[in-house]
Amino acid sequence: MRRLVHRPRRLRRSPSLRNLIRETQLSAHDFVLPLFVSEKVERRCAIASMPGVFQLSLKEIVDEAQRAQDLGLQAVLLFGIPEKKDEQASGAYAENGVVQKALRTIKSKCPDLVTITDVCLCEYMSHGHCGVTRIDGDHFHVLNDETVDLLVKTALSHAAAGADMVAPSDMMDGRIGAIREALDAGGFDQIGIMSYAAKFASAFYGPFREAAESVPQFGDRRSYQMDYANPDEALREVALDIDEGADIVMVKPALPYIDILWRAHERFGKPMAAYHVSGEYAMINAAVEKGIVEERAAVLEIMTALKRAGADVVITYWARELAAWTRE
């Protein structure tokens, strides 16, 4: 006679009951909205490869920030496009640079909105690389220490203009410690650092480089961004940035590196961010356009996966929509 085995049954109940016991919940507070502010435009300019994403003028950026806050988002991440570029990225740390002006206007209208600023030089360098370069014949080198000096100046100028948090995205060695020391010495000890700790040399950055006008004019960024085949090295980079004073550590891109996100979350117990990057955004939009996936369902599934893997914060171009969807 066969013996019956009693197993717990998978819950098949009403949607409201399922939501009550759901293990992973999303809310507007999980998401940060990236915004591009440009000195070159007087009205919003569409990014062809990123539907719904725009370069915004200095006049428009404050209204966009207000809209984000009204939707329930807690933070925006600012990227700047200057009128002119040079080989010292002087627009990055100018007192009246594009990000500095944007910060002051946003803070005057939305003082409670958390403003995070990208601290990198690629948008301000005439050659599009993330640091000071030296060319030797057919080869080029990014000069680490000279670049860190300019990153420190940039972070200090952002803090002075009203940034709540700076986000170094350059992947230079030692920049988190140098920025932390300079902020503390300058009286900005309350300014946080979100470190792009594990930023990989990825094929998924193309649309962003169009939006930020930061395509390298020669070579590529593999000498200072991470090899996507090296997970253990990524964890070492995360550990170094935590030791140097990072408050939040980021994995970028998001979905192709969800294993790194999980491992860092489990190992360090530090607040984690994931950047769902422009190429990931563009691919989903292309699939939506072709009728392959339904946008809301696909995006909610992706964001739930990232939070499930350990992301406390997700930087995403869908932040506005997610604020509305999660509220519903």
Image (spheres, rainbow, N blue to C red):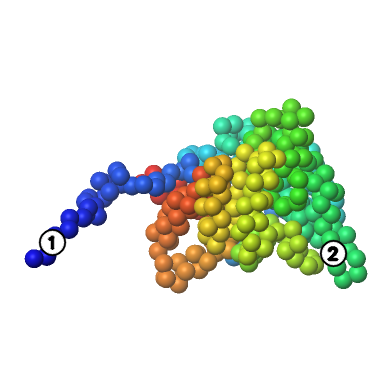
Which residue corresponds to the image point at 60% horizontal and 55% vertical from the top-left?
252
Query: Outermost residue, right direction?
Result: 137
Horizontal side of residue 216 vs 45, given as left or right = right
Task: Provide the residue designation for mark 1.
Answer: 3
Residue ID at (75%, 45%): 175
Residue at the far left in the pictured view: 1
Q: Amino acid at mark 2?
A: Phe
Q: Find numbered disc 1 in the image and state the secondary structure of the residue it sits on.
A: loop
Residue 10 located left or right of residue 323: left
In the picture, the quarter occupied by the N terminus is bottom left
Q: In the image, is residue 94 above or below residue 301?
A: above
User: How many C-alpha atoms fall within 10 Å of the one at disc 1: few (<14), some, or many (≥20)?
Assistant: few
Q: Nearer the viewer, residue 178 or 128?
A: 178
The kind of secondary structure element at disc 2 is strand
**Lower position in the chain sequence, tag 2 or tag 1:** 1
Q: Nearer the viewer, mark 2 or mark 1?
A: 1
Q: Is residue 320 left or right of residue 38?
A: left
> 10 Å neighbourhood of mark 2: few (<14), some, or many (≥20)?
some
Q: Position of residue 215 (x, y in %)?
A: 73, 63
Tell me the amino acid under the disc marked 1: Arg
Q: Percent position (x, y) of residue 166? A: 67, 41
Q: 305 or 30, which is in the foreground?
A: 305
Pointer 2 residue: 140
**For the residues marked 2 and 1, what is the alpha-carbon distance in whole angstroms?**
73 Å
Horizontal relation, residue 33 to residue 128: left or right: left
**Quadrant hosting residue 85:** bottom right
Give percent across and percent down for residue 58.
67, 45
Q: Which residue: 45% across, 72% down?
A: 290
* Towards the viewer: 303 or 222: 222
Q: Look at the image and tell me whether residue 79 can be seen.
A: no
